[in-house]
Image: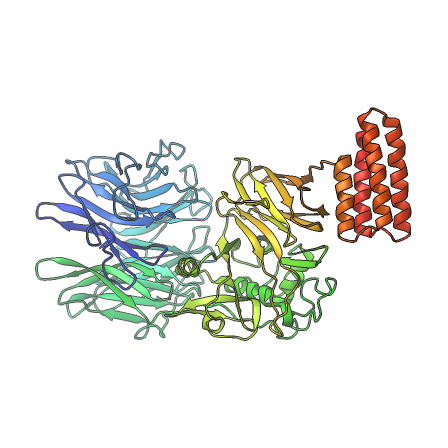
């Protein structure tokens, strides 16, 4: 078994090869989360593939977001070894839409050339790395389009080969950064000894000259060094592992590099750690990094002349974590022969699955082992919304919105949960150096349009705009106060089953979720998920400090994901009163939202619907009326058409918040009146990389102004006498205009405006109604 990958549902896909008696052939196996074969995949859980009439070997695999499985290795139709990729549907059937009937081959030379690792970039392009024989072995990198064709925009017609130094340059493992740049780990013959190397490629396939020495950094660990696995820390540092010879025995090593490509001297001994699994030969083939910075290695160690599965954990500074296993190491004998770990993944519940092989008397078997003594929860720091000094301070704009008591104690669960997650990602200070806590984060939201407020005829609303956290994280990273950006995604939970899949995927990626829940004590409360138990999720609860979602009957209303990202933070957020419908049409004609008669769900990843108000832990009261909102993560450039509608006459407040790729945000607040047959239309000219603009598209006519008067009268914003006199004047003006007597209409409009002024001075017309009608009269005059 060469490699394992985990699906979003927790099932495990393993790839490798087996002998059929004449030659080797591909094997793909899928296991259920409990380790049994998944009979819904291939034939009884197994797919075998004889690609050619000679040797075929699989070395690696990835799972696409749509569940399809991409595998890579080599095939040998004759004396020529070919890089080979294939794609399978989630049921194990070859995907004929990929490449040539599901397969893609790339020829480099006449000797051994093979794929060692594959990655999927943010454009769903496939990155393959390995080595190719062109006289001598050189590092090879290729990029393929989603359909399997070579991406000719990458280097030389999709392929880049690099001579590291002499002969036998082997690329063994790859890391794809969030900006889609590629880092390759491998080893090469440095003349009498083998050294490891890292090289970094730009998006066009050229070496990144800002990394290491013109794109390459070579490091000598011992006399024989191999590079096997690479991982990225949250702070951007690179951790690598493999095997070395310091003495006559092989040993395990770790090395850590800064993002610039040079050894991190704060790690271990000047950037390197030598630590053996056993007294005999040993080495590491795989590694993962936990959220707390812990580094877990998997490989082998020799005990009594046979190799055992070996798993060890190191702290972030390079020291051995002696609380893990037996003094930092798990050793596992499987059967009577030797065994080695080649791949590691971490399940959502914190358990670690290792995969490799174990040898018998005349054969090798695949082996999976799961360990439970790893960290079972994500290390999320805890804040309580009631704590001093922030507990008694005002939450949001609660005082001005008329909510008492207005304190963080009563309403601060959402912002406190956000502070916990940001702290877990290493953000200890705000951009100006203020320590990060729920109180300082609440103040930042207040000062940076993080809270969107408004009012309609029935009351006030307030909404925490989660997306502005992306702006905060980008500013904090730029100021050197945070190691990472944060991309925000808000996910509505349509069913209980869907949430388990979302959370399992997030836990596997070390991402704590902010979730909204409820029980008999509160109608809307935010907590942070930190792990998974057999029947629930462990949480950080900012008010009651409940240990798990069992305390809330496992009720999940919404998921808010703050995901580390260094690329695109763009977002469109539209928030309006809860009884107002929103319908958005994008530049492609796809619709999202509701027009009062029909709902539309055509825009990918968009979220539309009612957001319930935050609940109070005291008496089950709520903050405001909730909001109707439409969220568009990663929107495309172009013109968006926004239509508001309502089944009842009312005033409204629309908050339109836009965020660019770099986290720059803008907010436009629009107020007006709306009612049946009186839609309000707006255009949003959105740009990912520059200012966006939103504008009303007023269809102000005599009839629409009259409709405005009728709506204002219906909601008691204008007096009966004023309504009658104004409507009569507007009707007369309309008739005069239709017969071409514009001078008479101009006179009547002037009289109507004067009457409006008089009524306002007498208090007959409310302030909001006065502003709306005055605007309409102004536009009507301009139309003459």
Q: Position of residue 51 (x, y in %)?
A: 18, 40
Q: Quadrant of residue 698?
A: top right
Q: Quadrant of the C terminus?
A: top right
Q: Position of residue 171 (x, y in %)?
A: 30, 46
Q: Quadrant of residue 330?
A: bottom left
Q: Nearer the viewer, residue 462 or 206?
A: 462
- Is 508 rendered above or below residue 692? below
The type of colouring in the image is rainbow
- Is 618 rendered above or below residue 296? below
Q: Is residue 209 left or right of residue 576?
A: left
Q: Nearer the viewer, residue 741 or 250?
A: 741
State the residue at coordinates (20%, 35%): 110
Q: Is residue 276 visible?
A: no
Q: Nearer the viewer, residue 691 or 402?
A: 402
Q: Nearer the viewer, residue 530 or 399?
A: 399
Q: Position of residue 377 (x, y in %)?
A: 42, 69
Q: Is residue 207 visible?
A: yes
Q: Quadrant of the N terminus?
A: bottom left
Q: Quadrant of residue 5?
A: bottom left
Q: Position of residue 369 (x, y in %)?
A: 25, 65
């Amino acid at each position: 078994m060469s490699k394992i990958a985990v699906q979003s549902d927790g099932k495990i896909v393993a790839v490798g090869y087996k002998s059929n008696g004449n030659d080797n052939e591909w094997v793909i196996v899928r296991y259920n989360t409990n380790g049994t074969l998944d009979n819904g995949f291939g034939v009884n859980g197994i797919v075998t593939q004889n690609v050619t009439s000679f040797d075929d070997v699989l070395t690696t695999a990835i799972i696409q977001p749509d569940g399809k499985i991409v595998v890579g290795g080599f095939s040998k139709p004759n004396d020529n070894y070919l890089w080979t990729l294939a794609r399978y549907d989630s049921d194990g059937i070859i995907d004929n839409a990929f490449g040539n009937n599901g397969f893609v081959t790339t020829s480099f030379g006449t000797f051994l050339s093979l794929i060692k690792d594959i990655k999927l970039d943010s454009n769903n392009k496939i990155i393959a790395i390995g080595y190719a024989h062109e006289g001598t072995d050189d590092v090879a990198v290729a990029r393929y389009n989603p359909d399997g064709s070579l991406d000719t925009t990458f280097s030389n017609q999709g392929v880049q080969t690099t001579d590291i130094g002499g002969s036998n340059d082997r690329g063994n493992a790859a890391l794809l950064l969030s900006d889609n740049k590629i880092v390759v780990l491998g080893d090469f013959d440095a003349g009498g000894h083998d050294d490891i190397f890292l090289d970094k490629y730009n998006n066009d396939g050229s070496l990144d000259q800002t990394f290491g020495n013109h794109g390459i950094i070579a490091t000598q660990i011992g006399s024989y060094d191999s590079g096997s696995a690479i991982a990225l820390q949250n702070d951007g540092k690179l951790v690598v592992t493999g095997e070395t010879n310091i003495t006559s025995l092989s040993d395990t090593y770790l090395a850590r590099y800064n993002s610039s490509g040079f050894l991190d001297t704060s790690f271990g001994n000047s950037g390197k750690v030598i630590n053996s699994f056993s007294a005999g030969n040993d080495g590491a083939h795989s590694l993962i990094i936990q959220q707390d910075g812990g580094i877990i290695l998997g490989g082998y160690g020799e005990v009594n002349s046979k190799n055992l599965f070996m798993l060890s954990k190191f702290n972030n500074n390079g020291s051995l974590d002696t609380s893990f296993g037996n003094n930092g190491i798990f050793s596992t004998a499987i059967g009577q022969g030797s065994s080695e770990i080649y791949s590691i993944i971490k399940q959502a519940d914190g358990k670690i699955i290792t995969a490799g092989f174990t040898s018998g008397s005349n054969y090798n078997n695949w082996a999976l082992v799961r360990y439970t003594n790893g960290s079972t929860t994500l290390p999320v720091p805890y804040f309580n919304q009631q704590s001093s000094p922030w507990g008694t301070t005002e939450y949001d704009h609660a005082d001005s919105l008329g909510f008492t008591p207005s304190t963080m104690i009563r309403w601060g669960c959402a912002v406190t949960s956000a502070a916990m997650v940001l702290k877990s990602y290493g953000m200890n200070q705000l951009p100006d150096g203020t320590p990060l806590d729920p109180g300082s984060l609440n103040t930042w939201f207040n000062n940076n349009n993080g809270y969107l407020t408004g009012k309609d005829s029935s009351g006030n609303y307030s909404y925490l705009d989660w997306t502005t956290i992306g702006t905060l994280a980008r500013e904090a990273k730029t100021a050197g106060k945070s190691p990472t950006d944060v991309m925000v995604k808000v996910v509505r939970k349509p069913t209980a089953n869907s949430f388990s899949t979302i959370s399992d995927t997030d836990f596997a990626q070390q991402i704590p979720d902010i979730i909204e829940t409820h029980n008999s004590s509160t109608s809307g409360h935010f907590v942070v998920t930190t792990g998974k138990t057999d029947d629930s999720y462990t949480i950080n609860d900012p008010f009651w400090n409940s240990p798990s979602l069992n305390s809330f009957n496992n009720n999940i209303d919404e998921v808010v994901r703050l995901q580390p990202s260094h690329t695109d933070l763009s977002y469109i957020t539209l928030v309006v009163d809860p009884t107002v419908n929103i319908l958005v049409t994008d530049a492609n004609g796809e619709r999202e939202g509701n027009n009062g008669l029909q709902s539309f769900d055509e825009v990918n990843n968009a979220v539309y619907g009612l957001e319930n108000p935050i609940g109070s832990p005291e008496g089950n009261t709520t903050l405001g009326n909730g909001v109707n909102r439409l969220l568009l993560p990663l929107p495309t450039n172009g013109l968006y058409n926004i239509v508001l509608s309502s089944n009842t006459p009312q005033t409204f407040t629309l908050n339109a918040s836009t965020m660019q790729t770099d986290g720059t945000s803008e907010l436009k607040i629009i107020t007006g009146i709306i009612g049946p047959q009186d839609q309000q239309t707006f255009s949003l000219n959105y740009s990912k990389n520059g200012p966006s603009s939103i504008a009303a598209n007023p269809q102000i006519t005599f009839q629409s102004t009259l409709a405005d008067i009728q709506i204002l009268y219906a909601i008691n914003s204008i007096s009966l006498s004023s309504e009658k006199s104004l409507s009569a004047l507007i009707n007369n003006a309309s008739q005069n205009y239709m017969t071409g007597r514009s001078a008479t209409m101009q006179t009547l409009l002037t009289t109507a405006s004067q009457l409006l002024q008089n009524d306002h001075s007498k208090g007959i017309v409310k302030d909001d109604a006065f502003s709306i009608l005055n605007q309409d009269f102004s536009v009507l005059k301009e139309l003459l």
